[in-house]
Image (cartoon, rainbow, N blue to C red):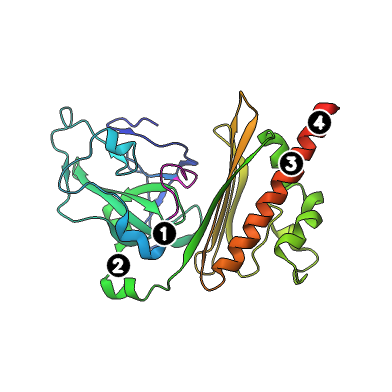
Amino acid sequence: MYKKTLTVFVILCLTTLTIYSQNKDEVKEPHKYGGWYCPDNLGGFPAVNIFDWEDVPVVNGRMPTQEETRNGMSLIFVDEKKYSDVVPLEMTMPRLATYYNNYSKRVEFVIVIQAFKIDKDSIVGFRYLNGGNGSSRFNEVNFLSNYEIDMIPSSRFISQSIKIQATQDVIWKILTKPEYAETFQPTFDKENNLDTDWRKASNVNYSYPNSGDQTSAYADKLFGSFYIQNDYNHNQYNEKFLLRENESTKETELIIVCGPFGDDYNTQQEIISHWAKQVKKISESHQTFSIVQ
């Protein structure tokens, strides 16, 4: 992605969005130095458990090099020879903050890993706890005090990937077609507690009973890769499913990020692992059948 005054190195982005401040009624236009939302950049910026946020790599005291914007240490590269007025803000990172995400329609925790001033505008780059990255104006994030950070419950994300010998088109049908819902339900609903019409409120054949109300949903092909993201209001629960196909081998990697989970982490980890294996088994059987046909 290229901006007028700097280069941003990311893997995938949904779109450049209108930026909302912490006051959700005040709308601002995206600034020309960023204002993007890349929740699917799970390779460059994987999910971070809340008790690990201070350990993410950063660049302090100077502007990052081009390589550092590629390796996850920072987000935005500015050519200082062309833009001599750019300076890093005098603050030590990483910093934990909250940010109203217009896409997920909720306030989310973010880890600020870059802050600089250019053309009289102060910019921050951050990574989401649930994976991916974004940017905003400095005054659109709310930095948390030590007390506020200490009050955040301990929780963890489940991050898994599995290689499947099938094309992403085949896997996508298995993941999203409602006719497969009953096949997968026993893997995550052993007690059969879900309402009979649970699939009508979901875009994927998976459900977490403690997710709360859904605030946003996305399921479509994005820059050549299928991607699903569902956001909920309980404990900032989120689920992401990304398919990356190797066009030469037709092997596809299914990347899963769900959470955060509390005391039920181990239980949900086992459930999701079993569910992913079922996706692999059924997808590969359908791929084989398709080839035979």
Left/right placement of residue 118 relative to residue 211 reads: left
Q: CA distance from mark 1 to mark 2?
A: 14 Å
Residue toward you, 60 or 21:
60
Question: In the rendered structure, which disc, 3 or 1, sits on the residue that comes first in sequence?
Answer: 1
Q: Residue at x 13, y 37 (%)?
A: 85
Left/right placement of residue 58 relative to residue 25 reads: left
User: Dot 3 corresponds to which residue?
Assistant: 283
Amino acid residing under circle 4: Ser
User: Dot 1 corresponds to which residue?
Assistant: 100
Residue toward you, 293 or 228:
293
Disc 4 secondary structure class: helix
Q: CA distance from mark 2 to mark 4?
A: 53 Å
Amino acid residing under circle 2: Leu
Left/right placement of residue 4 relative to residue 159 reads: left
Contact check, label 4 and label 1, Cβ < 8 Å: no
Q: CA distance from mark 3 to mark 1?
A: 37 Å
Contact check, label 3 and label 1, Cβ < 8 Å: no
Say above or below: 138 vs 11: below
Question: In the rendered structure, which disc, 4 or 3, sits on the residue that comes first in sequence?
Answer: 3
Disc 1 secondary structure class: strand
Magenta span has 168? Answer: no
Residue 80 sits in which quadrant? top left
